[in-house]
Amino acid sequence: MSNLAAQPNTHQPDPEAPAPGRAPILQLRGVSKRFPGVIALDDVSFDLYPGEVHVLVGENGAGKSTLVKLLSGIYLPDDGEILFDGTPVHLRTPHAAQELGISTVHQELNLIPHLDVGKNIYLGREPMRGKSGVIDWPALYAGARGQLRQLGIELDPHTPVSRLGVAMQQMTEIAKALVNDARVLILDEPTAAITAEEAEQLFQLVEKLKAQGTGIILISHHLEDATRVGDRATVLRDGKYVDTVPMATSTPNDLIRLMVGRELTQQFPKETIPFGEIALRVDHLCRAGLLHDISFDVRQGEIVGLAGLVGAGRSEVARAIFGIDKIDSGTIEVFGQPVANSTPGKAIENGIALLPEDRKHQGLVLLLSVGDNISMAAPSATGAPRGLIPPRNRFQTARRFIDALRIKTPSARQKVMFLSGGNQQKVVLAKWMLTQARIFIFDEPTRGIDVGAKVEVYRLMGELLKGGAAIVMISSELPEVLGMSDRILVMREGAIVASFDRADATQESIMSYAAASTHDEMGAAA
């Protein structure tokens, strides 16, 4: 492994490149991209060979998304050049990139939900009956079915996209990309919102495409993805090129050291904090068809983790406690006092905060500034009179949290949409800290953020606990649940089926309950 300092960009071919003697299909040479107050990419070079999976890694804000947008035709570089088959190209629009053979499957999928799979696959490239200008629907669906089968996917192309899970939507996006004759496929966080089994199916498809000669760029915060399918990995840090390493001789820890410039000696900085009184008690909570007799409590200084498979009902518990969804029966107590959290406003008054799973759409207003987002849940805390909050109050308040939480932003006036995922999560946390909440519900707190930002979020959770808060943490990452929780509740089909103290929990014991199909199986697992 090379040293940890960002390397000068020599623009030389990578000596570890696969298939010596073969020319790269795609190259970036000395590319830079600047925005007001920010250098997103600074003299970065990168290359991709046919039949290669090249993993692009780095912390949030490292420049990965900007590089992808350059290759997708969304941005134009300010300096440097992009070469395709050795020829300089100008990707002025996404359509130009697709025509050249570069297709991107973004983390936010670009499908039309009310159309079916076949129509989405051939959107804009529908086969016509001769010169009549009439779409040849039988040919379209036959082609879509054949494309799906070629990828090893058994799916009726007449199925509406709205009925598909995230994994099958991704498969549909990939089929659509290949119909567009893609020679380069960019996968942006493809495993962020799918199960381990679905991820394995995706990786099998990646291997098949690789064997067919497709060049694949994979962006993922799950470094295990890099070791699972990657041939090489290029590391970016603060918009600069750091190193390109062969995955055959590299580990996730090697990549982490290159990404953050230091060793992460403790991935889960969990501190032992004495428990206080019961802050939240949920008793026999029920909602028809979704939640069945949910009962648990959380003490001050304690993290109670909710584990389970997708669809187990964990987020539904959070939504019910926070008053988003109505409950049919059961009670909620906050510090011993019965409360009726019939609306989110009531929950906020009772000192409950929810950091939602989808922070971009449910936790933030992306078009507003950092200061506006921080102050919106507790306008009175800015010291302003009733009514509109003067900008000066908003930004003064925001600056306190920007400093305290180490939010990386040029100013409190920066639109929150331009922040990295980890910094957006800190803005959501700052918003709730301003309300002086005492009970925090974190739903997938580190989804879509890098390892360095994850440690920062865990550190902030520890600070909340020291201040007397109680935390409910929902996570699909079992190492995170095991590393941060004091107690773990396992959910399945809308019910709590097991409870473990921190010292007794293992990944195997949690999964044996989460995936059991009957109560007999659960008993056998115990």
Image (spheres, rainbow, N blue to C red):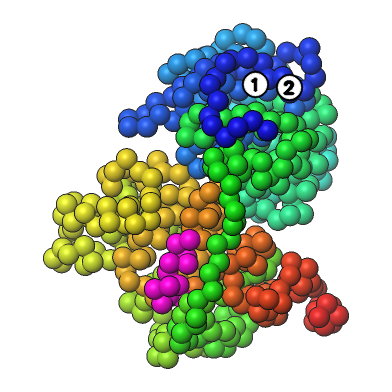
User: Is 78 situated above or below 302?
Assistant: above
* Residue farthest toward the top in the current orientation of the protein: 87
Residue at the (71%, 77%) spot, across then down: 504
Q: Give the image quarter of residue 188.
A: top right
Q: Position of residue 16 (x, y in %)?
A: 73, 23
Q: Position of residue 189 (x, y in %)?
A: 61, 43
Q: Nearer the viewer, residue 362 or 416?
A: 416
The residue lying toward the viewer, choosing from 268 and 507, is: 268
- The span shown in magenta is 459-470
Name the residue at 60% across, 32% down. 3
> In the drawing, what numbered circle is on residue 47?
1
Q: Circle 2 — which element?
A: loop
Q: Are marks 2 and 1 in contact (CB under 8 Å)?
A: yes
- What crowding class fits label 2: few (fewer than 14 Cα within 10 Å), some (14-19), or many (20 or more)? many
Q: Tell me the kind of residue under disc 1.
A: Asp
The reply to whether residue 84 is in sight is no
Residue type at tag 2:
Ala
